[in-house]
Amino acid sequence: VYNLNVGLNKYDYLQSVFAPEVYKCQLKTNEAEKIVFDGRTTRQAEKRDQNDLSKTIFNTLSWNKNYSGMHDLKVLAGFSYEDVHITYFAARNEGYLGNDLHELSAGSGNATVGGSSAKSVRMSYFGRLNYSFKDRYLLEGNFRYDGSSRFAKGNRWGMFPSFSAGWRISEESLMKDYPLINNLKLRASWGQLVNDSWGGSGEEYSEWFRYVDLIDLNANYPLNGNIQSGAA
């Protein structure tokens, strides 16, 4: 039996924020007090834009056969592919003369722009073999040959096997004297897995495993009484 599953996930996020300068006046004293908008003490505009696109392809081919009503054999093989592309942009500006113009280009000071992008590709070849004798003694073997672009070249592919054995004690004839126990199984397993994210769910690209040192372009420093631009 052949199965094919294809998935496409698109996420678009756009946010525009404008912090106006609003004052409240005391009628008795005629004093004006500035109202702080969401922690912003100066009139400013800010925009953020994030676009995520992920594609998945999952293929499986399975076969099963029962021999003489005692031996049951199941075989499965498959291939999966997943890629994720994320882009992010943010900009902010200050120096607005009034509360009517909200565009970034209408500001006149302390403009900041930032952005980032990330791409990840995962591929996997996998298989599974199940064997049972009289639905009583169970054996299972799995293998995965996984690859991830989140690792450095030369370390992106690896084989990860797993094995298990089970004994359905409740199917033994001696258990017929214990009608209260209808399903009792003893199982032991061993296996290996891989993780290409350093924390969290791994869905955010900030949680992906990093094999290249990051460069911080906002490492400013004081020199001769002035703030200089730097990187670290």
Image (spheres, rainbow, N blue to C red):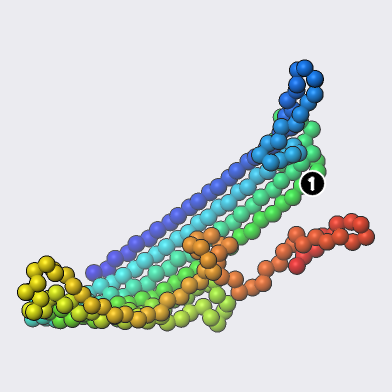
Q: Could you tell me if residue 222 is visible in this image? A: yes
Nearest the viewer among 124 and 98 is 98
Nearest the viewer among 91 and 138 is 138
Quarter of the figure that contains the C terminus: bottom right
Q: Is residue 118 left or right of residue 107?
A: left
Q: Residue at x 41, y 74 (%)?
A: 124
Above or below — where is 153 with respect to 202? below
x and y, in percent, of residue 133 in the image:
15, 81
Quarter of the figure that contains the N terminus: bottom left
Q: Residue at x 36, y 66 (%)?
A: 58
Q: Residue furthest top?
A: 28
x and y, in percent, of residue 129 in the image:
26, 79
Q: Is residue 19 left or right of residue 224?
A: left
Above or below — where is 15 with respect to 198? above
Q: Residue furthest right?
A: 224
Q: How many marks?
A: 1
According to the picture, the residue beneath numbered tag 1 turns out to be: 110
Name which residue type carries label 1.
Asn
Nearest the viewer among 196 and 36 is 36
x and y, in percent, of residue 100 in the image:
71, 29
Nearest the viewer among 161 and 114 is 161
Are there few (<14), some (14-19), or many (20+) residues within 10 Å of tag 1?
Answer: few
Badge 1 element: strand
Q: Is residue 72 left or right of residue 59?
A: left
Dividing the picture into quadrants, the one containing residue 171 is: bottom left
Dividing the picture into quadrants, the one containing residue 37 is: top right
Q: Residue at x 72, y 29 (%)?
A: 22
x and y, in percent, of residue 62 in the image:
25, 72
Q: Could you tell me if residue 66 is visible in this image? A: no
Q: Residue at x 89, y 56 (%)?
A: 226
